[in-house]
Each structure stands twice: as structure tokens, then as C-alpha cells.
Image (cartoon, coloured by chain):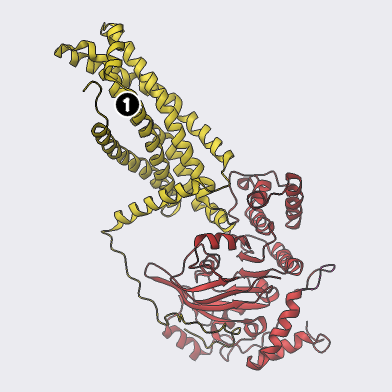
């Protein structure tokens, strides 16, 4: 079972520029979470802070009792072995072949025999669909392939926590769909806690158990997927429907005047935000033959427990999703 | 805007440390102290490298590769530079001693100059110019391609995995190269003194043992060791902290060579002064 990640009051600035402040959330053990946000809101910075590459000024990130912000370097290094991080552009070692890249964590951290390393690495290469390219150097393959190789390297140590930085960028829609399925299958198999940072709406709608959104130096919200997918918070609904009307402007934030004018004119939909009822797309299920996702069962208990505190729309969506027969009309 | 938060997972039990709610006021570091800060970080890196040297597992493969690389780019230039250098010193000292009427001491004087001063400096300049710049560029481009981050994320310390083998390689190559340069430089000096200035071979060799002593060789090798360490550390430090993009890596390489040169000449002066104080000159 994965490990719970508790983030408390995290605040990060670069010089005078505040990236986000007072971010608190809990990634429930073994579940898949997605962090959304417009470009440039510090999603990648958030990922790197969780793993301890960047040090926020305030707050802490607790994993197994180790604070990834303030603990001694030795503990942090030890805890990092539980992580698999997929970088935005793969971050492969340019001087090594794909095979050596993917074998690197095994050779560094385990005393496995070369034949066994070969077996594990080829298995992972097969999962991400790179068979035949293992002898190539990272400079000789496409960006999408580098990305998948980066994922294979992140998976090779059977991590308890998997962090993906924009797994979709540079991939075509079909590969993105395969990747979404792959992430869910992985979660079913190894039950790792996963955090995906993205602004791809398909991934956001179909993959996660939980969603969060960063905007304008704050964590707008974090909760079960249905809550965000049915949310009528302007930022969230604008983002999830990809509209121009709403608080998000080209340079992150619209000024108040534009926003007011927009609301007066009653923009495209006629009735302001969130008027078109959004349907909650069902979550991806593991492929046939995969084990049942333990996280889905745990999440069900957890969500039912907090039902009373959820908004009406989210409650309906959750009830629909948990009673498959009743919601037969769903597309 | 701060939206009302619809739901959050259950908060962990309240702790005593409550984070400040308002935007933290960042104290801007003053620019005046920037050089001190850089120096401090350089020393911190030197310290952590020294500590990481003793941490297992030692990266034998990486060490041998780096050792071979640095040796291969420095041996030939070092030999070629040291012949004219030994010759220049021999000629200069030779003509000076001739005027003073102490021609028989040419050998000792030029050999002392070559072994104690010229040789470690030639070694250091070549190590930092040829080896250090390559190390700096290599680490710098790995840094901007996020390879070092990836390594750290996998729980592997880049200092132990990459920097330690490189620093050890520069140190050992420096020591060995110093031997080579001393020998070649001395032979060059001998050749020019005896052939060009018609010095007597016997006097040259005799003054050698009259003035020079073993500690001169020790300090020479010690200097080379220290210079190799400095060249390696400075190259690694600049390589690990490039500023912004590929241009930053170029600047870092440039700076690493310049900083190393300045540090070397300063450290050389200090070491020489200390040596002359604590080791009495032969025969005095």
C-alpha cells in the first residue's frame, strides 16, 4: 500500500516573487491525485517541493514521519528511494543508453545480478512500449519516447509514491490515453500513491480519485474528483471547460474591470458561469486481467464518510458513480 | 482570489507550529555580501566533498574514467610547456649567476625554481584549463538538463557519484603530472645550461645536491595535490551552479578557470611563505 503524503502550510517564494502560499493538503495513501492549474502557477515547483529538491520557506511535507523540507539531508535521501519522479522532459542521462538509464536506480540501490536487472528493465521497457529502442541514446529518440523512458526509470524500483510532471506534454492524444490507462493499471498493480501535475483535461477528467487546483498563489481547492468536476467555483469551472470567460486571463489573472464587464455582458452562455450542466465522465477502470484497485475501495469508504460535508452536486455525482445500475443513462 | 474551499481531507491533528497566514516578507540579501556568500558556498562544497570521499560505495569506474580523461588531455601539453619553461629559467638564472660570478650554482638555483614554483603552477594551470573546464562544462550541462535533479530524486548524491571521483582524479593527476613536469623541466634546464651556455655538467649536478633537499620535492608534490583539489572543487562548484541556460554554462566555465587561477597564485604564495619559514634552507 502506498504512503500518505501530508502537506502543511507550504509557502514558496523565489526572491520577492511568491509562487504559492499556505498550501495544505493530504494525498491519501494509494490514491491517484491530479494537481491542475494554468501554466506558470508553480505546479512543477510544488512537485519538486514535495520531493525536497526545492526548499519552501514555511510549512512541511510529511512522508513516513520525515519532513522533506527540514529534516537532515540523510533522512531525505533515504526517503527519496520511495519515490518515482517522472520529469517533464524525461531528464535522462545523456551519456547513457536507455537501458543503462532505466537500470541506473537498480544498479545504485540494489545488489541484484546483471541478469535480473536485465529482466526487470526489459519488463519496464515493454510496459512503456519502447522495446527495440533500449540501445539508443536519449539524444537519438523523440521527446515522447524520452518521456516514456523517464516513466520506466521512475517505475523501476517499485516506488510507493509516483509523481508525474505533465505526463501528457509532447504526447499525441492516443498515447496520452494509453498513458492514462497505464497509470491506472500501475496503481491497481502496485497500489502506489500517485500525484500527476497536468493541465490536460482528459487526464483530469478520467484518471484521478482526487483533484486539486493551484491558481493565483493559492491552492483553490483539493478534494474528491466529483467535487471539482461539478464545482461552480468560477476558476475551477472555467479551467475544466477550457473557456475564455472567467477569472483566468492570458497573463494568469484578469483585472477586475474586465471581469466585471464580462459578467455584465452575460458572456457566451447567457447566464454567467457554470450554467451548462457538466457531466462527470466515469473514471477509468483497470484493464481486464488487472487486480481490483484497492485504492478505489478505500476511497469509497473515505468519501462516503465525508459525504455530509460535500456540496449537493458532488454528492449526486458520487452516488451515481457508486450505483452503476441506476446511472444507466450515462453516456 | 481565494475561493471558498468546498472540502478538504481531514486535517491532521493541530500542531504547535502554525504557519504565518500573511505573505511572508522576504528579506532581500544585500549585494555587498555576495562575494562572501559565494566563498562560503565554495567552502561548504569543499567540506561536503571531503566528507563524501569516505562514504561508501566509492565510484571506482567513474574515478578511473575521469583520471584517464584528465591525464590524457594534460600530459602532452604539460611536457611541451615544461621544456621551454625549464630552459627559460636556466638561461635567466645562468646569465645572472655569471654576472655575479657564481656560475657553479646555476644548477641548484634553476632546479629549485623549477621544482618548487614552476612545476606545481604549470600543473595547476593545465589541470584547471584543460581538465577543470571540461568538468565544469560537463556538470553544468547536466545541471541545466535536470540530470542532477533526477539523480538526487533517485536518492543518489551527485556529490558522491560525480564530484568526488572528479576531484580525486584532478588531485592524483596533479601529483603525478607534477613529477613529470619536474623531471622534464630539470632536463630541459640541464640541456640548455650545458649545451647553450657551456656550463659544466659536473658543477650543475654538484650544486644541485648542495642547495636542493628532499623537502623541496615534498612541498612541490604537496602543492600539486592542493592545487589539484582547488581546481577540482572550483570547477565542480561553478558547474553545479550555472546561472540560467546554456549561456550560463559557458560563463561558468570561463569563471571557473579565472577563479582557479587567482586562488592558485594566492595559495601558492601562502604555502611558499610558510614553507620558507618552517623548513630551513640547506646549509644554513
Residue A127 lies, in percent from the top left, at 75, 57
- Where disc 1 sits, the SS reads helix
Q: Is residue B111 visible?
A: yes
Q: Is residue B174 above or below residue A33?
A: above
Left-right relation of A122 to B256: right
Q: Nearer the viewer, residue B196 or A62?
A: A62
Task: Reply yes or no: does residue A291 show up in magenta.
Answer: yes
Residue B79 lies, in percent from the top left, at 41, 22
Left-right relation of A192 to B195: right
Q: Residue reaching furthest front?
A: B284
Residue range of the region highlighted in magenta in the rendering? A288-293
Question: For mark 1, does the 10 Å Cα neighbourhood hold few (<14), some (14 to 19), or many (20 or more) residues?
Answer: some
Chain at tag 1: B
Q: Please name the residue shown 32% across and 26% down the image.
A: B216
Q: Please name the residue shown 29% across and 20% down the image.
A: B212
Task: Reply yes or no: does residue A306 show up in magenta.
Answer: no
Residue B275: name its quadrant. top left
Q: Main secondary structure of the magenta part?
A: loop
Say which quadrant the C terminus of chain A sits in: bottom right
Residue B47 lies, in percent from the top left, at 41, 50
Residue bearing mark 1: B216
- Chain A on-screen colour: red
Chain depicted in yellow: B
Residue A30 lies, in percent from the top left, at 69, 72
Amino acid at each position: 500500500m502506498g504512503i500518505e503524503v501530508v502537506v502543511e502550510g507550504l509557502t514558496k517564494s523565489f526572491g520577492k516573487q511568491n509562487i504559492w502560499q499556505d498550501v495544505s493538503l493530504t494525498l491519501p495513501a494509494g490514491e491517484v491525485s491530479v494537481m491542475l492549474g494554468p501554466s506558470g502557477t508553480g505546479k512543477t515547483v510544488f512537485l519538486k517541493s514535495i520531493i525536497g529538491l526545492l526548499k519552501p520557506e514555511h510549512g512541511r511535507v510529511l512522508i513516513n514521519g520525515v519532513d522533506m523540507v527540514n529534516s537532515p539531508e540523510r533522512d531525505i535521501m533515504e526517503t527519496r528511494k520511495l519515490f518515482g519522479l517522472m520529469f517533464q522532459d524525461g531528464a535522462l542521462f545523456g551519456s547513457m543508453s536507455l537501458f543503462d538509464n532505466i537500470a541506473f536506480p537498480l544498479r545504485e540501490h540494489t545488489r541484484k545480478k546483471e541478469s535480473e536487472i536485465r529482466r526487470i528493465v526489459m519488463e519496464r521497457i515493454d510496459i512503456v512500449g519502447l522495446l527495440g529502442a533500449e540501445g539508443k541514446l536519449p539524444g537519438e529518440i523523440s521527446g515522447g519516447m524520452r518521456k516514456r523512458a523517464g516513466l520506466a526509470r521512475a517505475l523501476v524500483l517499485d516506488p510507493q509514491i509516483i509523481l508525474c510532471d505533465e505526463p501528457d506534454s509532447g504526447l499525441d492524444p492516443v498515447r496520452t490515453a494509453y498513458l492514462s490507462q497505464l497509470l491506472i493499471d500501475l496503481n491497481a498493480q502496485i497500489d502506489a500513491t500517485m500525484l500527476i501535475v497536468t493541465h490536460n483535461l482528459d487526464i483530469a477528467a478520467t484518471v484521478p480519485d482526487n483533484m486539486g487546483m493551484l491558481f493565483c498563489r493559492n491552492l483553490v481547492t483539493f478534494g474528491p474528483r466529483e467535487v471539482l468536476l461539478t464545482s461552480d467555483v468560477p476558476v475551477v469551472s472555467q479551467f475544466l471547460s477550457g473557456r475564455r470567460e472567467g477569472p483566468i486571463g492570458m497573463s494568469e489573472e484578469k483585472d477586475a474591470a474586465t471581469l466585471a464587464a464580462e459578467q455584465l455582458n452575460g458572456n457566451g452562455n447567457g447566464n454567467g458561469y457554470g450554467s451548462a450542466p457538466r457531466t462527470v465522465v466515469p473514471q477509468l477502470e483497470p484493464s481486464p486481467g488487472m487486480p481490483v484497485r484497492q485504492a478505489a475501495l478505500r476511497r469509497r469508504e473515505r468519501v462516503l464518510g465525508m459525504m455530509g460535508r460535500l456540496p449537493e452536486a458532488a454528492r449526486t455525482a458520487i452516488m451515481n458513480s457508486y450505483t452503476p445500475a441506476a446511472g444507466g443513462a450515462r453516456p | 482570489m481565494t475561493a471558498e474551499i468546498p472540502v478538504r481531507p481531514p486535517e491532521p491533528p493541530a500542531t504547535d507550529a502554525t504557519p504565518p497566514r500573511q505573505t511572508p516578507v522576504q528579506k532581500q540579501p544585500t549585494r555587498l555580501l555576495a562575494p562572501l556568500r559565494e566563498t562560503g558556498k565554495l567552502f561548504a562544497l569543499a567540506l561536503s566533498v571531503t566528507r563524501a570521499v569516505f562514504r561508501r560505495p566509492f565510484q571506482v569506474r567513474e574515478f578511473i574514467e575521469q583520471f584517464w580523461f584528465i591525464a590524457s588531455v594534460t600530459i602532452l601539453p604539460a611536457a611541451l610547456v615544461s621544456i621551454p619553461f625549464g630552459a627559460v629559467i636556466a638561461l635567466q638564472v645562468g646569465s645572472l649567476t655569471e654576472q655575479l660570478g657564481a656560475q657553479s650554482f646555476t644548477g641548484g638555483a634553476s632546479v629549485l625554481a623549477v621544482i618548487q614554483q614552476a612545476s606545481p603552477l604549470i600543473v595547476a594551470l593545465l589541470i584547471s584549463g584543460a581538465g577543470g573546464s571540461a568538468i565544469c562544462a560537463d556538470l553544468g550541462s547536466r545541471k541545466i538538463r535536470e540530470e542532477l535533479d533526477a539523480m538526487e530524486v533517485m536518492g543518489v548524491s551527485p556529490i558522491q557519484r560525480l564530484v568526488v571521483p572528479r576531484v580525486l582524479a584532478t588531485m592524483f593527476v596533479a601529483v603525478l603530472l607534477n613529477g613529470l613536469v619536474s623531471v622534464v623541466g630539470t632536463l630541459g634546464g640541464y640541456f640548455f645550461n650545458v649545451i647553450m651556455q657551456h656550463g659544466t655538467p659536473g658543477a650543475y649536478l654538484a650544486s644541485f645536491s648542495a642547495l636542493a633537499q628532499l623537502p623541496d620535492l615534498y612541498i612541490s608534490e604537496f602543492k600539486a595535490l592542493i592545487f589539484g583539489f582547488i581546481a577540482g572543487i572550483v570547477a565542480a562548484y561553478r558547474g553545479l551552479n550555472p546561472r540560467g541556460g546554456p549561456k550560463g554554462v559557458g560563463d561558468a566555465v570561463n569563471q571557473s578557470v579565472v577563479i582557479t587561477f587567482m586562488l592558485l597564485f594566492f595559495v601558492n604564495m601562502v604555502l611558499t611563505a610558510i614553507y620558507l619559514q618552517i623548513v630551513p634552507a640547506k646549509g644554513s
